[in-house]
Image (spheres, rainbow, N blue to C red):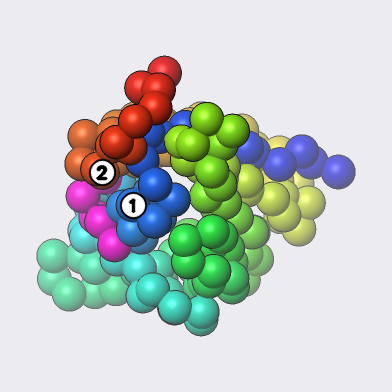
């Protein structure tokens, strides 16, 4: 079994604000210049069955995945198949209140075994990619734009 990729960030904001930033403002934080098919814009149709879509400048669309769990503001799961719509992997993103009142955001990407011989290599690429996307893209954006908790610790 190929181990999942797991990335965790902690934000000094509410689950609701963290969830909304992740979904509604994905185009503002996703590092499209490094992680895209067509260097376009990214959007999420915010509902069960909704699509994650990249739209190229010429209007061409590329579906990256489908929402398989929609439990706002707690959980989001995605059948993920960027570049390979025949063999999806699975992503879950959980938004949980930490003991000190902040919001922990945990992204777990699984399903590498279904990719056969390519699974190990793709997992390695995604491990580096998700760390960059979640920490340098999403968390940096959320820390700059989400309303901070009125009281409590600052982000570390």
**Vertical placement of 92 versus 45: above or below?**
above
- The residue lying toward the viewer, choosing from 152 and 61, is 152
**Which residue is located at x 29 percent, y 36 percent?**
150
Quadrant of residue 135 in the image? top left
Q: Which residue is mark 1?
A: 17
Q: Is residue 5 left or right of residue 83?
A: right
Which residue shows up at 79% across the image and 41% down it?
2
Q: Dot 1 lies on which element?
A: helix
Whether 69 is drawn above or below 13: the answer is below
The single residue placed furthest to the right in the displayed view is 1
Closer to the camera in the image, 79 or 115: 79
Left or right, 14 with respect to 105, comes to left
Q: Is residue 114 above or below residue 67?
A: above
Residue 24 occupies which quadrant of the picture? bottom left
Chief secondary structure of the magenta portion? helix
Secondary structure beneath dot 2 equals loop
55 left or right of 8 in image: left
Residue at image position (34%, 30%) is: 151
Verify whether residue 27 appears in magenta.
yes
Image quarter for residue 35? top left
| Image location (x, y in percent) of residue 149 | 33, 37
* Span of residues in magenta: 24-29
Q: Are marks 1 and 2 in contact (CB under 8 Å)?
A: yes
Q: Return the residue nearer the eye: 71 or 100.
A: 100
Labels 1 and 2: the sequence-earlier one: 1
Residue 146's disc is 2
Q: Which mark is residue 108?
A: none
Residue 1 image offset from top left, x and y in percent: 86, 43
Viewer can see residue 83: no
**Residue in the image at 36% along x and 75% along y:** 45
Badge 2 crowding class, 10 Å Cα cut-off, few under 14, some 14 to 19, many 20 or more, is: some
Residue at mark 1 to residue at mark 2: CA–CA distance: 6 Å
């Amino acid at each position: 079994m190929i181990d999942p990729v797991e990335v965790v960030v902690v934000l000094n904001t509410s689950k609701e604000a963290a969830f909304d930033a992740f979904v509604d403002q994905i185009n503002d934080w996703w590092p499209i210049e490094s992680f895209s098919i067509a260097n376009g814009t990214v959007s999420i149709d915010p509902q069960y069955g909704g699509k994650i879509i990249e739209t190229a400048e010429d209007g061409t669309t590329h579906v990256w995945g489908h929402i398989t769990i929609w439990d706002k503001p707690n959980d989001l799961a995605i059948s993920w198949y960027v570049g390979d719509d025949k063999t999806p992997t699975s992503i879950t993103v959980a938004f949980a209140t930490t003991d000190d009142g902040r919001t922990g955001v945990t992204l777990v990407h699984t399903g590498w075994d279904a990719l056969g011989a390519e699974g190990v290599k793709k997992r390695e690429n995604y491990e580096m990619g998700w760390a960059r996307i979640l920490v340098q893209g999403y968390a940096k954006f959320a820390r700059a734009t989400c309303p901070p908790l009125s009281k409590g610790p600052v982000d570390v």
